[in-house]
Image: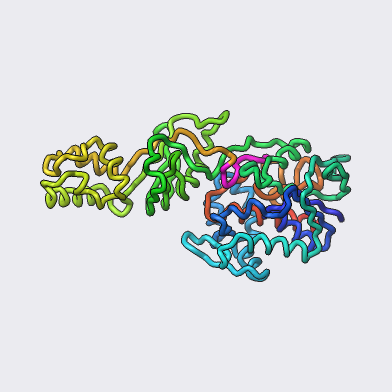
Amino acid sequence: MQVVVIGGGVAGTFCAGQIAEFGHSCILIERNEKIGKKLYLTGKGRCNLTNDTDVPGILSQVLHGDKFLLSALHRWGAADTMEFARQNGCPVKVERGNRVFPQSDKSSDVIRLLERYARDNGAEIRLNTRVSGIEIADGRVCAVIADGRRIACDRVVVATGGRSYSSTGSTGDGYAFARQCGHTVVAPRPALVPMYADGYATLAGLTLKNVRATLTHDGREIASQFGELLFTHTGVSGPVVLSLSGYANRYWQDGALQGKNELLLDLKTALDEQTLDARMQRTFAQCANMRLRNAVSDYLPKALVAFWLDRAGVAQDRFCHSVTKSERERLVRTLKRFSISVRALGDIECGIITAGGVELSQVQPKTMESKLVSGLYFAGEVLDIDALTGGYNIQIALSTAYAAACAIKNS
């Protein structure tokens, strides 16, 4: 049996290696000069390979496609990924939040592992080769057109990724192949991206740890995340913001964020309002003749204190003894619900992943085979599946690739 896998990312390379290991002839076609180009960017260059949790733990972090993934994750889960890496010369470590990284902290080690695995099992890897279409005859795939040449085949796996970081080759080709074969493609939209907010450029570079950020849409709470937040020249980023953007993008329409969207930051998560108010009363009593900005300088990073006082509507140069009860209550509320108005989401180009993709109802969840075209399979980000940060999206790529490879083995 001749199998063609389109796309040399995580899903495609792993799938090709599995198919070849199962004894089938497999050609992996990659448009770039090397495989895994986008993988170099993941985990800030360290490659967050998976998350050391069970299937329910992974599914709890999937924003769309959790039911679809159930079978695939049970067949290839986080423990399988970690063991696969270890057995193939890439020891891993588990860090905060159960995030799994190669011990070397180098994504290049994961890329070499995948390429070596595919080549050693006998997969042929064709680099610098662009696929332009898939031929179908009598409802079955029969060939792939690559650089004007026809490659006859019995099975095709589309693992071309999404549309983010197009310089790495993720230009949405897989969506075009899916449409060509009669599939519906849910409109791609940015996922795991920064949020744009005006007025915070002077805070650029400031990182807040142990913050709880809550996303609201038109006044309704949508989701909440705890962790690290980073101010940028254009707004906010960091793990909590990237994750919440995955919820915010459901309000993305016609290239813009619809409705009123806000982030409410709890800047003092260890203290409830009553305890925080008591602390502030003690501060004001001990520093009665000090200027407010000096008395509360240890409540927040120095750069943020002025924003807090201004947002609460209390002048910075007031003496503490002159602060009224209602003003103090405003100061407490603002610490617990510091509001940032979100103007827009980062462009799809800068998304860690892309939301949207091949409509899941048209794909068999146990095999990843198309319900419309026999012999056509999809794996990884090209599917309409997306999850939060933490290694879940790479795990999904591996699990769906394994499901497709097993189905081809048994077909």
Q: Is residue 392 above or below residue 175?
A: below
Residue placed most toward the observer, 372 or 144: 144
Q: Where, by quadrant of the figure, is residue 219 drawn? A: top left
Residue placed most toward the observer, 192 or 217: 192
Q: Does the magenta portion include 356? A: yes
Q: In this view, does 126 lie to the left or right of 205?
A: right
Secondary structure mainly formed by the magenta segment: strand
Q: Position of residue 335 (x, y in %)?
A: 29, 44
Q: Where is residue 99 in the image (x, y as percent from the top left)?
A: 52, 60
Q: In which quarter of the image is the C terminus?
A: bottom right
Q: Is residue 384 visible?
A: no
Q: In this view, does 338 lie to the left or right of 223?
A: left
Q: Is residue 112 visible?
A: yes
Residue at screen point 87% across, 44% down: 149
Residue at screen point 71% across, 54% down: 35
Residue placed most toward the observer, 408 or 110: 110
Q: Does the magenta portion include 337? A: no
Q: In this view, does 148 lie to the left or right of 205?
A: right
Q: Position of residue 381 (x, y in %)?
A: 65, 47
Residue at screen point 44% across, 43% down: 232
Residue at screen point 46% across, 45% down: 237
Colouring scheme, one of rainbow, by chain, secondary structure, one colour: rainbow
The residue range painted magenta reads 350-359
Q: Where, by quadrant of the figure, is residue 305 drawn? A: top left
